[in-house]
Amino acid sequence: MYLSPKEYIGEIPPDELERRLSDAQRAVDSLTFNRIIKQGFDNLTEFQQGLVKEAVKKQADFVYNNADLLESPLSGYSISGVSMSFDRSKVCSIGSVTTTKEVYGLLLQTGLCFRGV
């Protein structure tokens, strides 16, 4: 695991933490085209490792705090004139992963998100 439950500091309750971190790690692996798995986390530079750990933490927090919206089949809704939807300037969907632009920005800095060959 890229970020151990012992390293995590945040809002996720201990009984959900391991599952949430595992889900976040799979999202990060998807966003980086499984390059971390291929070359091994320990073979990344310290800089890359730090960014990946921060991205996993932020992705886990994002999904935990927005689980109801992310798991809903609706893209937005309105009740009595009040509507709700994600701010597309802060959230992005890449493939099947919905994340924040902050998380994706961290991963872009690692060089592991390059879409070319």
Image (cartoon, rainbow, N blue to C red):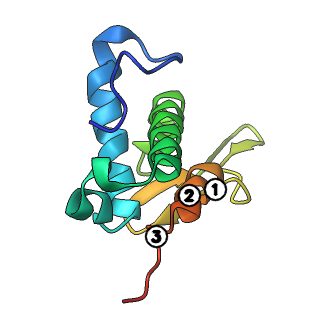
Q: Is residue 71 or residue 46 the one in the foreground?
A: 46
Badge 2 crowding class, 10 Å Cα cut-off, few under 14, some 14 to 19, many 20 or more, is many
Say which quadrant the N terminus sits in. Answer: top left
Residue 113 - label: 3
Which amino acid lies under the numbered mark 2 shown in the image of this protein?
Tyr
Badge 3 crowding class, 10 Å Cα cut-off, few under 14, some 14 to 19, many 20 or more, is some
Q: Is residue 80 or residue 45 the one in the foreground?
A: 45
How far is disc 1 from disc 2 in space, using C-alphas? 5 Å
Residue 74 appears in the rendering: no
Looking at the image, which residue is at 69% across and 59% down?
Answer: 88
Q: Secondary structure at mark 2?
A: helix
Q: Secondary structure at mark 3?
A: loop
- Kindly indicate whether the residue at mark 2 contacts the one at mark 1 (C-beta within 8 angstroms): yes
Which amino acid lies under the numbered mark 3 shown in the image of this protein?
Cys
- Kindly indicate whether the residue at mark 2 contacts the one at mark 3 (C-beta within 8 angstroms): yes
Q: Check the image and report above or below for 11 versus 23.
A: above
Q: Check the image and report above or below for 49 versus 33.
A: above
Q: Which badge, 3 or 1, comes first in the chain's sequence?
A: 1
| Residue sitting farthest toward the top | 14
Q: Which residue is mark 1?
A: 101
Looking at the image, which residue is at 44% across and 53% down?
Answer: 45
Q: Which badge, 3 or 2, comes first in the chain's sequence?
A: 2
